[in-house]
Image (spheres, helix red, strand yellow):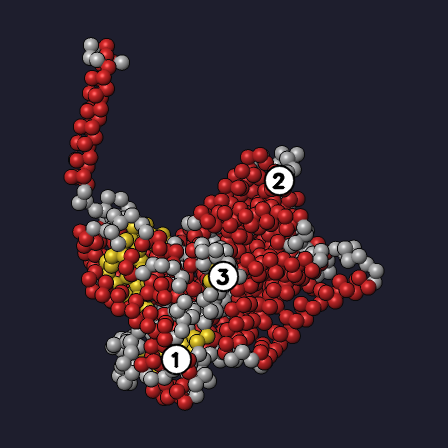
Amino acid sequence: MLLTSLGISRTASILLVIIIIAVVGGLAYYYTSVTTGPKYPSKPITFIVPWAAGGGTDRTARMLASLLENMTGWKTVVENRVGGGGTVGHLAAATAPPDGHTVGIITFELSTFYWMGLANVTYKDFKPVLLYNKDAAAIIVRADAPWKDAIELTNYIKANPGKLKASGTAKGGVWDIARIGWLKTAGVDPSALPWVPSTGAAPCLQDLIAGGVDVCTCSLPEAGPLIDAGKVKALAVMDDVRNPAFPNVPTLKELGINWSFGTWRGVAVPKGTPDDIVKILHDALKKVIDSPQWKDFMSKNGFGMAYLPPDEFGKFLENDFKVVGELLKAAGYTS
Amino acid sequence: MDLLTALQMVLQPHVLLSILLAELFGVFVGAMPGLTATMATALLVPFTYFMDPVAGIAMIISMSAVAIFAGDIPAVLLRIPGTPASAALTIDAYQLGRKRPVSTLGVDLFCSMLGGLTGSLILIFMAPTLAEFAANFSSVEYFWLTMWGLSMAIVISAEDPLKGVLGVIIGFMMACIGIDPVYGYVRYTFGRLELLSGISFIPAMIGLFAIPELLKQISNPKERYVIKLSMTERVFELVKEVLRKFKSVVLRSALIGTFIGALPGAGADIAAWVSYGVAKRTSKSPNEYGKGSLEGVVAATSANNAALSGAWIPLLVFGIPGDSITAIALGALMAHGLRPGPMLFQRQGTLVIALFIVFILANILMLLIGYLSIRLSSNILKVPRNTLVPIIAVFCVIGAYAVNNSLFDVWIMLTLGVTGYFMERLGIPIPSVVLAIILGPMVEFNFMTTLIKSDMNPAIFISRPIAAGLAVLAIFTWVLPFLRSRRRYVEGDTGKLGT
């Protein structure tokens, strides 16, 4: 060896090498942690979307990511982790390394997985960043239906249990829970309006105009074209205020049924992510959703704009989880 | 006046350039197994946000049209359907391609264009009428329609209708895996999250079609090339023959395709199967089907491109997308402030006309891009077999992985590939299995939801006029092959002579 040839003993030379490595390594570690430690992001940020490319969640996520990239210069990647009714993507986001470089787009379905017995992933596995979208459910019927408003419809359902059928999404999906909550709040047994599962709002609206079902509980923008075409009408929206794009549709609360419900989308990171990273991410995303481009995109697409900061989003998630659980239990869906 | 303004909107350099670029992208997407026109549309949509509406929507229209054609390229050359819409013609096209790959693709291209044009013309002139008719379809009608589609699985099985039924049952069983779409019960997943949404269709399709052929190629290593490429073969040399013999097949398939495309929930893949089955049923030489029938290829490829245009009918008229591509295109339309529905035609009439012009233009330009892609892609056959077979295997793996970014899907592809090999050896028709995987969930879902609507009273299945008509059609198509093979049997025929 080089060192022994210089007259240093073998043991000493081995020790020396170890010391040098330790010092250099330690210094390198110290300096990198000092210089890159607080710097976030240090690599591209991956957004995990639990639904297929082209759907509403995917479209909003891609817009969010591309505006984030434009406004901050950070690199972003959108990855669709599809399958298992949304469980696969939510799980992937919840179990990613908690360093803020993998960010989950979380959706309403997160509140249902546990209750429906699909997967053991809940809001507790995430640290919320922000909520960016909420779409309220509406009550849609055929244009020639005899009911003038939601109260008449509710009374008809109460007087003729089982006669009408409703649809809008899968069993236990968001529009189904909207129906259960609406009827329960109005003092009607939810089973008086049986639920016909559908694969989404569009097939349900098709079934509605074809005469297959009588009521659809989907969002107003989804029914917009058919309202224009004079094929269907909206009796009420399950929101706190009227939808500005549909000013003639009253809220259920105005009609005396104190119930509002809808789907939502938000951003969250794995549970162990440091708070300062959550803050950096939140501040950057907040700028995005305040931008005119984002607002223009959301309103043209008919997505409802919403915002909740991390702590309030957390409380919102907790409450949504509880309400959904109670309603699913009341409907006998939980397993 | 409107027409002139619309023409001016389309015939701008940047719009034409967008169409050309989108078509090149479409070739790539369609020809790569595992990448579908639906996925590509989803990737395109964010780009269209930053373009003017005509250019943006034109990109989606032209990309998807070319992708559906280009899906036939690997089907002909390698027996891998590039997109699900090519599954119906894969076996025949590949058999034809073994002798004349380039001109088979030429026929594909030409008929894709004719189908696309027919579909576009119907979209332009009959959209409101067809949309009104399609609006009558509830789950009862869909149940019978999918049952009728399923009967094609028996029609298309060449040798023995019973083996076709067996294929359907195998496909049905595979389709049962995952969350049951009606009550939400979890079935046959063995606790695997990946199986919750069922066996992914595209990996299954790649495995069932491509892997058996690869295994066959390995076990028969004598020839140097998978397919011999002839230098003198011209792309459009078969077109004249097709136009002479199969004019009516093209037209009928395009009409069937447009109509099925216009029904929400049924798209280009089902359209191709149904017109293939109808063509076989009415063919003078049904025995060639499954062994390289030009007529069968013509029928399927005309229909899938027609369905693409048809799918825009309910989208534009009622805002209800006709297939998965238009479901995404709806987002692009909305992003440009174009709300579909009758108001779109009134408020944005010029723009709608411009889009119609794009439909025609995109299908015609497809001829040029398609020609180049055929010339280019057929070179892959110059690769010697011992190099090409591993390359195809890599394509299969990547394609299966790319759909959901999931390694699990690669295993599904490989497992079903080996299963498919043995099914082929046993004479169980793979197309029947694939068709059942597509239609199985739809049959089940429409059957169950219909019964829920009627409080489990089965009378509902024939209670509506269109449903009753479709029921008669479906039952007739189901029973006929067995009556025929029975008659053959009675006449002392072994049942195999006829095929």
Q: Report helix, strand or loop for mark 3.
A: strand
Residue B299: name its quadrant: bottom right
For label 2, the residue is B217
Q: Position of residue A119 (x, y in %)?
A: 38, 59
Pinpoint the chain carrying mark 2: B
Quadrant location of the N terminus of chain B in the rendered image:
bottom left
Q: Is residue B132 visible?
A: no
Type of amino acid under label 3: Arg
In the foreground, B250 or B135? B135
Type of amino acid under label 2: Gln
In the foreground, A3 or A71? A3
For label 3, the residue is B187
Q: Are marks 2 and 1 in contact (CB under 8 Å)?
A: no
Q: Residue at x 40, y 63 (%)?
A: A117
For label 1, the residue is A190
Q: Position of residue B431 (x, y in %)?
A: 61, 56
Quadrant location of the C terminus of chain B in the rendered image:
bottom right
Pinpoint the chain carrying mark 3: B
Type of amino acid under label 1: Pro
In the foreground, B270 or A245? B270
